[in-house]
């Protein structure tokens, strides 16, 4: 894998924004170019969101200039397709929801927006997040960036492949029985299943909510 800024840990990237050596707009465009390059092979993303990312990156750049940047300002983040992003489809990996456009953000997505994160796209999931491999009838299986003949794990396999392939710095995932931890281990990442309820899980897929925590995948 590369060693450029798209592979940097979150804090190093934010520090570079703060000292002016990197620009959120520049990194957002690099992320979209990287998605376009690797997604045909990895199928990490079901929906890149370049226009949303450009708007958020421009806002983050302005916030750094005027000293009001949030803790995640300009950081490229992918969103597991079990969470709502207002105005974008939430498929849950199912043909039954292939055209369901979200009317609001999930709670965790709303918090990411408030912190200044740049949403680069929605990542693939197993159908209804029910498998430890990321496969569904909407498209090809998500592949492992280190060996595309192998699985990235699941059900947050799209998020893991997205982070490990350098398309984003952090992936938002969810975990009931290993759905963050399995793909993180398969793709050489850190995946955290926080205490249930520690991160807002409102407004998303909550069919198994007593067992599911919202958490990150990162380097």
Image (cartoon, grey):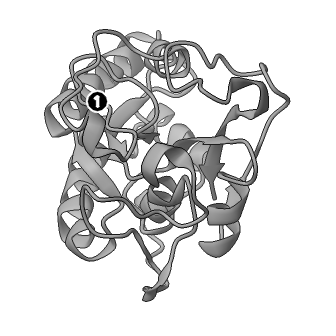
Instruction: Report the residue at 54% width, 67% height from top.
Output: 133
Residue 158 in view in this figure: yes
Pointer 1 residue: 57
Q: Secondary structure at mark 1?
A: helix
Residue 23 in view in this figure: no
User: Quick one: quadrant of the C terminus?
Assistant: bottom right
Left or right: 179 as drawn, with respect to 177: left
Instruction: Report the residue at 49% width, 21% height from top.
Output: 204
Q: Position of residue 189 (x, y in %)?
A: 66, 64
Residue at the extreme right: 195
Q: Nearer the viewer, residue 110 or 166?
A: 110
Pointer 1 local density, CA inside 10 Å: few below 14, some 14–19, many at least 20: many
Q: Is residue 41 above or below residue 88?
A: below
Residue at the extreme left: 51
Q: Position of residue 45 (x, y in %)?
A: 31, 54
- Please identify the quarter of the rendering in which residue 137 is found: bottom left
Left or right: 79 as drawn, with respect to 130: left
Left or right: 1 as drawn, with respect to 211: left
Q: Position of residue 35 (x, y in %)?
A: 25, 60
Q: Is residue 112 above or below residue 203?
A: below
């Amino acid at each position: 894998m590369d060693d450029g800024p798209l592979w940097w840990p979150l804090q190093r990237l934010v520090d570079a924004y703060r000292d002016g050596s990197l620009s959120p707009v520049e990194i957002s465009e690099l992320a979209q170019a990287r998605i376009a390059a690797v997604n045909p092979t990895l199928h990490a993303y079901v929906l890149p969101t370049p226009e949303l990312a450009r708007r958020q990156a421009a806002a983050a750049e302005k916030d750094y200039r005027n000293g009001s940047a949030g803790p995640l300002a300009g950081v490229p983040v992918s969103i597991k397709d079990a969470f709502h992003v207002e105005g974008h489809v939430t498929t849950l990996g199912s043909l039954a929801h292939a055209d369901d456009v979200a009317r609001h953000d999930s709670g965790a997505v709303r918090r990411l927006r408030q912190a200044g994160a740049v949403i680069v796209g929605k990542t693939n999931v197993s159908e209804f997040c029910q498998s430890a491999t990321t496969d569904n009838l909407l498209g090809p299986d998500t592949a492992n960036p280190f060996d595309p003949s192998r699985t990235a794990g699941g059900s947050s396999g799209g998020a893991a492949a997205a982070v490990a392939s350098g398309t984003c710095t952090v992936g938002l995932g969810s975990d009931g029985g290993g759905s963050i931890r399995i793909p993180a281990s398969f793709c050489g990442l850190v995946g955290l299943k926080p205490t249930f309820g520690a991160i807002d899980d409102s407004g998303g897929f909550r069919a198994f909510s007593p067992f599911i925590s919202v958490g990150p995948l990162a380097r």
